[in-house]
Amino acid sequence: MTTRAAITGTWTLDDRLAGPVAEVPVEVRPGTAALTVRLSYDRSAGVLDLGCAGPAGFRGWSGGARSEYTITPSWATPGYLPGEIEPGVWRVLVGLHRVPLGGLPYEIRVIRHVRPPARPRRRRTRFSRVPGPVPPEPAAVRRRLPSPPGYRWLAGDLHAHTDHSDGTLSVYELACVAAAAGLDFLAVTDHNTVSHHAELAAASALAGLVLVPGQEVTTDLGHAGALGDIGWIDFRQPPDEWAKAVRDRGGVLSVNHPVATDCAWRHPMADRPRVVELWHWSWWDRSWGAPLAWGQAWTRDSAGDPAGGLVVVGGGDYHRPEEGHPPGAPTTWVLAEGDGRGPEAAGAVVRAVAEGRTAVSASPGAPLLLRLEDEFLAVDADGLVLWGPQTRRVVRGDRVLLPAGPGVHRLETPANEVVAVCT
């Protein structure tokens, strides 16, 4: 028979300081066919996140986006992993994101189903009936961008969210929006979960662009992008452990939006990642120099050391259409092996980022600065200024080749507004 249990208590500020994620044990008996968990508390008084671990490990995370989840052998709430309901001790993960001084009372209701409940229909949006777009010409073809034999410049975005975390679109809907924006690839990086990875291949084929598996490792002291088909990264561990796990599994870790408001990067690290999302969509006033100053302080970029220099990427951090900016604002360009199509393309994007073959522009059609071996190509940049560690030069012409020096370079307006960046 279906059984129900209620667990009540009060989280304190001391609990939060002891560890940002608490575990509430739940006994699951043999014969349980599905598990539902509901969290309730006064949302005007604090913020709690929600997740799950089974006897064999991680089963999902929804942060503060949901107050309930269900896991069955064949389906699960977005953000969670379907599969066997193993008997034993499960753990409700509760992120103590904001707890007031006086404490935060909570109630957790647990339902152990003897039969799996029916799968609920996903909420429909105005994008739900968007047909898969006809794949457009690749961005490099549209903009006539040269590349070495066996490589192609691809335009994309390394930071986006779906309804598997706090976005509103499904993976397929998001892929259609990104393709319509003129992107060749998109990394889907939901917060602290990889449940969306199972949907990437089908959505990629239908929408006609490359979808890169990713996870935004999300903590109160900063966010990082884990890129590649590398499985789940445990956000509860110290950041140096994230970096090691990502590196050992063949992925790339980027520090995301390091000077953002309430999620700026404040984690100390012994081994600092080279890849940094310096150009986040929230960099509205690009004459504000804090992102560039942060990047110069973070790495040895000013010394021109190719082994330790900064690798700059951008992130649109897309969540929902109402935000008013599409995926690809800004656009990250990568010089990837192959033609940007087929099952190997996602891995080629990740390798290009790891090896520093990147550039960032405001959009797929905006002024652009690319490194072509020992030269820069400035596209649609007439009247802009090329800045680098030892470079100051006015660009004259719409397609101009200029000598390339080491380190990060950028195009600016005469008023010092950043227009494009190149690693």
Image (cartoon, helix red, strand yellow):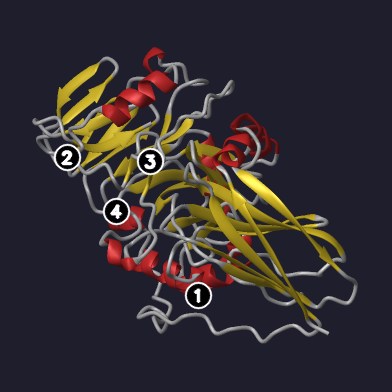
Q: Amino acid at mark 4?
A: Pro
How would you rate the neighbour count of disc 1 (Cα within 10 Å): few for under 14, some for 14-19, many for 20 or more? some
Q: Amino acid at mark 2?
A: Ala
Badge 1 or badge 3: first in the primary sequence: 1
Q: CA distance from mark 2 to mark 3?
A: 34 Å
Q: Amino acid at mark 3?
A: Asp
Q: CA distance from mark 1 to mark 3?
A: 36 Å
Mark 1 or 2: in front is: 1
SS class, disc 3: loop
Nearest to the observer: residue 54 or residue 417: 54
In the image: residue 125, left or right of residue 224 = left
> Where does residue 271 sit, x and y in percent of width and height?
58, 23
SS class, disc 2: loop
Q: CA distance from mark 3 to mark 4?
A: 29 Å
Mark 2 or 3: in front is: 3
Residue at the image position 31 percent from the left and 31 percent from the top: 291
> Where does residue 321 sit, x and y in percent of width and height?
32, 67
Residue named by callout 4: 364
> Where does residue 279 sit, x and y in percent of width and height?
33, 40
SS class, disc 1: helix
Q: Check if mark 1's residue and mark 3's residue have beta carbons within 8 Å.
A: no
Residue named by callout 2: 381
Residue named by callout 1: 206
Residue at the image position 66 percent from the left and 40 percent from the top: 250
Badge 1 or badge 2: first in the primary sequence: 1
Badge 2 or badge 4: first in the primary sequence: 4
Badge 4 or badge 1: first in the primary sequence: 1
On the question of residue 145 being in view, the answer is yes
Residue named by callout 3: 262
